[in-house]
Amino acid sequence: MINIFRRVCPILCLVAAAACAMPETRIYSLQVPAESSIASPRKQVTVTLQVHSPRYLAQPYIAWRLSPYQLELSGYAKWELAPVDMIREIFRDALIAHVQQVRISNAVPEGSLVLAINLRRFEGVDDHFGELLLDAELSTATGEEIYRMTASKKVPLETKDSAGLAKALSAAMQEAVRDVVAAIDSRV
């Protein structure tokens, strides 16, 4: 009996150790280069930026949509920041080149314009493309709507992994920011 235990124990220990091994956590970021446009005077306006999202986009986990009804969050592939926070920073950086002041707050000072971004999708879909869907609404401090648009971008994945998704969503984000900022610039 002891002889059997001596033979089986090392095998059980190896199986247990293999079962406890965790994959390496990988962290990804977006690369959205700053706009390289001809320097134009900044508009003398303050924009208060507000970004909202579903709960799963307020976490740093990379999301893959498997079907219209199923979403899978990766446990070991993460964004450097939650998507809602990355979007907030990217829009803030883009707006700074166009307006006098950008604030990130839920409190809106009198005379400020409000840019509300509702991030609805920021995910990989079926290992084929990255999808970005957001609504942007520009309004006055009193709530009067100035402009509203939806940016919907689907970019094919070069590679069917999280690095390919990061590259696709970077391209989608760059286009969406360019569209939203150009629309705001023409209406302010």
Image: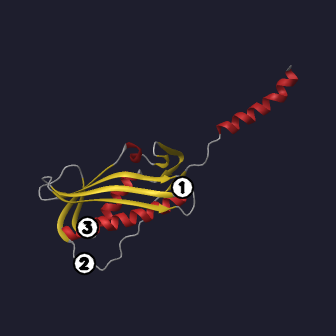
The residue shown at (30%, 80%) is 38
User: Label 1 to label 2, Cα distance in Å?
Assistant: 37 Å
Q: Which residue is mark 3?
A: 183
Residue 63 vertical position relative to residue 111 in the rendered view, above or below: above
The residue shown at (60%, 49%) is 24
Q: Quadrant of residue 173?
A: bottom left
Q: Which residue is mark 1?
A: 162
Residue 35: x and y in percent read 35, 72
Q: Assign a secondary structure to mark 3.
A: helix
First in sequence: mark 1 or mark 3? 1
**Within-10-Å neighbours for mark 3: few <14, some 14–19, many 20+:** some
Name the front one of labels 2 and 3: 3
Residue 159: x and y in percent read 57, 61
Residue type at the position of mark 1? Ser
Q: Quadrant of residue 181?
A: bottom left
Q: Nearer the viewer, residue 2 or 34?
A: 34
The residue shown at (24%, 51%) is 105
Q: Which residue is mark 2?
A: 40
User: Label 2 to label 3, Cα distance in Å?
Assistant: 16 Å
Residue 11 seen from this side: yes
Quarter of the image that includes the C terminus: bottom left
The residue shown at (35%, 52%) is 119
Residue type at the position of mark 2? Ser
Residue sticking out furthest to the bottom? 38
Q: Assign a secondary structure to mark 1.
A: helix
